[in-house]
Image (cartoon, rainbow, N blue to C red):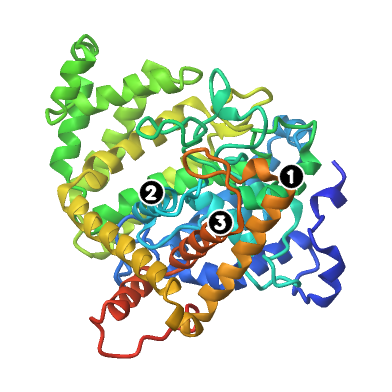
Amino acid sequence: MDRDLRTQRRDDAAEAAWSDLAGNPFRADRDRIVASPFFARLGGVTQVVSAAGSGLLHNRLTHSLKVAQVARAICDRLSAAPEAAGLIGKFGGLDPDVAEAAALAHDLGHPPFGHLGEQVLDRVARHRFGLADGFEGNAQTFRILTTTDVRGPSAVGLDLTAAVRAAVLKYPWARLHRPDPHPSKMPNPPRGATEPADAPGTGSGKFSAYSTELDDVAQAREPYAGLIEPWQQTIEASVMDTADDIAYAIHDITDFHRIGVLQYAPVATELGQWLAHALELAGMDSATLTAQTRLPGRSLELLRRRMHVRDSWIVDDDAFADAVARVRTQLVDGLLASGFDGSIEAEQATAGFSARWTTRLVGGMVVLESPTTRSGHVTLRPPQWHEVAVLKFVHRRFVLLRPELALHQRGQASLITMLVDALDAWLGDRDEESRLPRRLHDLVELAHAEFSRLAAEAPELLVGATGERITGEDAVRGLARGRAVIDFVSSLTDRQAVSLLDALSGRSSQPWSDSFVL
């Protein structure tokens, strides 16, 4: 591939006015991302539960740094594999700086309180503001990089190279419109492209661009035309995506071990009972298993069955059993059996577990010439793929589904909803219009310009949450107002969101100011 196409920026004319420390354009992109205030704010955004200043839990910033570390290690691994070199070139190339930059950027769009905040903002965006695109963290990341960050030479996005922008597109399609035909209509849709079962007609559950950024998607993907399918990730996007899975599977496990949430007994019982009674459990009907999920081994058996339905291209019962046994040996009988007491020995055991698993998973990377629609060109070999699935199961079953976490998250959901309501009411108060936070005012103007352009140039993209065509200036302004509020709230840290709602509801006795927001 012509390197010039991959290094192309959207605004080359303004490039002369920009001073980058690095001469390599991809390293310059990495520097621009790290210098962004959106990157800095990730230190105050929840990964799973709020770190609240603790050094024991990852936040979105430390997670992103580890994803970048793993992504670069994957690049080194694949670059040293002779059998991978030809395929990498065939599908567009693999530059470690591109993969690292994408990894550093991949969570910029995550709102306060992590995935919980993402779900709430999506619901509010669609139901309250009529935004068909709703909210999606990956799409918000791309919007930040191309639109709402002002550190680029034209104060519109960061003006990154085409390769890095394409590498950020984990799900390279819009919720509803692009590409055409939409991947959600495929017989076996790509991972994330299907509609949520509880929200039919709303489009793909996961996507990486709103309608307002589709021009940027097309330009970023142009160098790969004819090399990969419109719905496929670039090689570097696949590396970033897999690195995210690896980092998530390992460090969320070690986080909750360190704070005493992930306990030996329940995990040992679940995995041990499945290993001891796999044949018996395989003979039970799914309805019985679902009704008995509190009994050990049932949840793991349901996971095995879901994997057969979703990923028949790779799932293998022997590989699954081997993965359960390996996790049982290394996680349960190894790490969890000793507990965590803050001692040097406990720290070394935790670090050793993380290092061993990272090495094993990175060592299991492979480049596929003709991957299934459910996989990118870069993926894990079957043994490691099954192991990641089991590690993620342990995290979900014994951390995410805990009632204590649900109680905490219900409060956070209410907080975000009330904050959106309060800001929307402020925007609607004509007497207070002149005292709006300057950034919110700017975001309204930006969104209005974007939706006005769509109305003039691509009216088929301007639809409401129920599919109706949007026409008229008042309707356009309503969409712009909604998108601006969502942009504003999603750019806050956890603590900023709490403090801002306290101020807007009169619970704070001090004038609230934060230069990034106000």
- Mark closest to the chain's N terminus, 3 or 1: 3
Q: Residues within 10 Å of mark 2 (few under 14, many from 20)?
A: some
Q: Residue furthest bottom?
A: 510
- State the residue position of label 1: 218
- Quadrant holding the N terminus: top right
Q: Amino acid at mark 3?
A: Thr
What residue lies at 81% left-to-right and 63% top-to-bottom? 11
Is residue 498 visible from the viewing direction of this image?
yes
Residue 243, percent from left and from top: 52, 46
Closer-to-camera residue (269/374): 374
275 is higher (above) or lower (below) than 249: above
Question: Depth-wise, is mark 1 or mark 2 nearer the camera?
Answer: 2
- Mark closest to the chain's N terminus, 1 or 2: 2
Is residue 95 visible from the viewing direction of this image?
no
Question: Depth-wise, is mark 2 or mark 3 nearer the camera?
Answer: 2
Q: Which mark is residue 63?
A: none
Q: Residues within 10 Å of mark 3 (few under 14, many from 20)?
A: many
**Disc 2 element:** helix
Q: Which mark is residue 141?
A: 3
Residue 315, percent from left and from top: 44, 20
Q: Which mark is residue 123?
A: 2
